[in-house]
Amino acid sequence: MGMAALGSASALGLTTISTRRSAQAAEHSQAVVIGTGYGAAVTALRLGAAGVPTVMLEMGQSWTKPGEDGTIFSDMLTPDRRSTWFKDRTEMPLASFLWMDVANRDIEPYAGVLDRVHHGDMSVYVGRGVGGGSLVNGAMAVTPKRWYFEEILPEVNADEMYGRFFPLANSMLGTNHIDPEWFERSRSYQFARVSRAAAEKAGYKTNFVPSVYDFEYMRREEDELVPRSALAAEVIYGNNHGKRSLDKSYLAAALGTGNVTIETLSEVRDIAQQQDGSYALSVKRIDEFGNVLGIRQLTTQHLFLGAGSLGSTELLVRARDTGKLPNLGEAIGQGWGNNGNVMLGRANLPQDLVGPLESGMPAMGIDNWDDPANPVFAEIAPVPAGLETWASLYLAITRNPERGSFRYDPGADRAVLQWREEQGQPSIDAAKQLFDRINSVNGTSYRYDLFGDARAFENRFTYHPLGGLVLGEATDLYGRVKGYDNLYVTDGSLIPGSTGVNPFVTITALAERNIAKVLAEDIPKNT
């Protein structure tokens, strides 16, 4: 059985963890956390620091072992089997360039780091491995506008969140800010300056965005003083250097308590409650090539679901509809949204060169969120192709009120997302209004060659799945699942479909808030 244990080291000033084989864990643990993403990592650290023996169950592997090329992760331009979760071909968000599929590669099925989960008209990108989505995202650590946070989660104390938990989350995550002076002369952010100029000419403001990628390391990358990562087309398949993913922050600290272990390549399939009130889990164990090693039974007194919007929601939808947790209510599986995601590209004018070197880590966004009629926050995204593309790319976050839900499919034994392509139209409309103006003022046009067909806007996938187990509906106001004691949700499934910005700081801060309450009120009376 793969077990992750602490192996402290210092690499580029960041704490790291390693994985080694170790003895099998006990069949019962006082606390079990499913997943190792943002909410899960927060929860495990705080449980471990409080002295609670805790097992984390991770579906993917621990990314600590270099491949044959000496690196842990593969880059975007030459992906190999490490890139993708058990598929025979990669599935890039940019499906084409000049209508040719030049980015994807045939690969050997393997327990890779990025998965694209297909649900009919919507597919969802998720991270697979110790650190979850932190391994594969663009590192943009954005705190939402307070007025919008108060709107989406009105029963959560915003003073407490903005005074205590958002600052705590940002500190623990290692959030940092780009040096504005360096940004202005950096070759790797020429693409962002081109998009900024076009937006400002149209009357829109741009903001720098914080990041968990070490901008000082990136500065040294550009000066060719250290191995390149963000400047070597590394992002969606993992970063070999510079990025403060969860394995280097919360999870390293959790393992450091001595009370937390991580079991890798372990997928929880079923949850049931036993007569004494504890929970029994069926855990499928595989190797890195997908061979099933066995089904293990594990019991726990306190169960925390941190498997993400898709994973946690599926576990509870399945448990309810198979009768294993029959007291779960109708709110389970409701309130899902894609954070209003829509991707688009613009064709730059011939004189507006972006240059061949583009940082894989965005550092700026077009911020039109305070527009009451058409709120949009658009990441200025890179196209790190290593050559001049004359293209500007954006991931727009819009205020789309449409929501999806999950239905259990007994034949496939999975929860299926109910989402129609037309539900994404409000996002396209919002993005189009903003970028029509930018194109009109600048004399530019959309790119129609990026998404595998002739569409200018791509809203059939999301990086920001949210909801399914909404706070205050499927759970109480601290993530306790209604109908069951000692069963908790601690991830993005708590958030009703939208944060208005990249969501991981919000997920982290909310998890900090919730576990503080649970430790104060629930764990002591049960230990």
Image (tube, grey):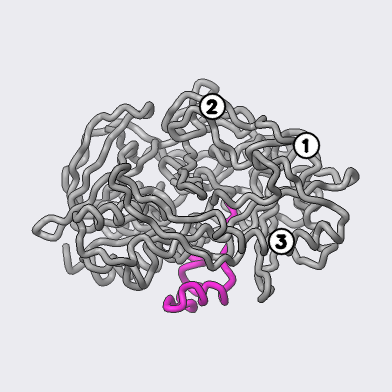
Horizontal and vertical percent position of residue 154: 46, 78
**Range of the magenta residues?**
139-168
Residue 80: image tag: 2
Say which quadrant the N terminus sits in.
top left
Between the C-alphas of marks 1 and 2, the distance is: 23 Å
Q: Are marks 1 and 3 in contact (CB under 8 Å)?
A: no
What residue do we see at 85% from left, 62% from top? 201
- Mark 3 or mark 2, which is nearer the start of the sequence? 2
Disc 2 and disc 3 in contact, CB within 8 angstroms = no
Which residue position is annotated with label 1?
Answer: 356
Distance of label 1 from label 3 (alpha carbons): 22 Å
Residues 360 and 202: in front is: 202
Q: Is residue 118 above or below residue 86?
A: below
Residue appearing at x 54%, y 28% in the figure: 71
208 and 251: which is toward the camera: 208
* Residue under the point 43% across and 76% down: 156
In the foreground, 127 or 341: 341
Magenta span dominant secondary structure: helix
Looking at this rendering, what residue extends furthest in the right direction? 351
Q: Is residue 8 above or below residue 380?
A: above
- Give how far across and how far down residue 230 sits, in percent: 64, 40
Residue 37 magenta = no
Q: Can I make out residue 47 in this image?
A: yes
Q: Which residue is mark 3?
A: 366
- Residue type of the residue flagged with mark 3: Ile
